[in-house]
Amino acid sequence: MNSKLICFLSLLYISAAAQTPRETYIKKWHKVAQDEMRDYRIPASITLAQGILESGDGKSELATKANNHFGIKCHLDWKGKKVYMDDDEKGECFRSYENAKESFRDHSLFLSTRSRYAFL
């Protein structure tokens, strides 16, 4: 291997390692957010911003254990898996998903079908 290639690969590795958790989150989920934008007309930037805020860049306990990136609570109509965590109150029910992509879809459905968010 020549020295230029070794230097290039070293710089590539260093730049990838230097990404912030937020940049890593955006890089990982931007395509999913863009797909949701095409299907539900919710700007990908809004979806990503809320996911970043609610999940602590994907590192929160709710995101890592329940794949819930948006802090969506169970509500009365939820029939899926559940996890219980302290939030506004002790032991609140949150939706749990098989994977994070399901969380993004549920977020889109939540915003697009609930009258509470219709004005948005």
Image: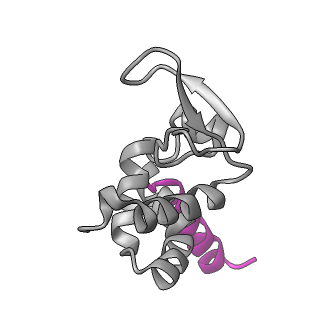
Majority SS type along the magenta span: helix
Quadrant where the C terminus sits is: bottom left
Residue 39: % across, % down: 52, 82
Position of residue 59 in the picture relative to residue 46 (left or right):
right
Residue 42: % across, % down: 39, 74
Relative vertical location of residue 9 with respect to residue 52 in this rendering, above or below: below
Instruction: Give the residues in magenta.
Output: 1-20
Q: Is residue 119 magenta?
A: no
> In percent of the image, x 36 and y 23: which residue is there?
88
| Applied colour scheme | one colour
Relative vertical location of residue 26 with respect to residue 71 in this rendering, above or below: below
Foreground of the two, 49 or 74: 74
Furthest toward the bottom, the residue is 38
Where residue 81 sits, quadrant-wise, is top right
Residue 26: % across, % down: 46, 63
Foreground of the two, 7 or 58: 58
Position of residue 118 in the picture relative to residue 54 (left or right):
left
Q: How many marks?
A: 0
Quadrant where the N terminus sits is: bottom right
> In percent of the image, x 57 and y 75: which residue is there?
8
Q: Is residue 15 visible?
A: no
> In percent of the image, x 40 and y 44: which residue is there?
54
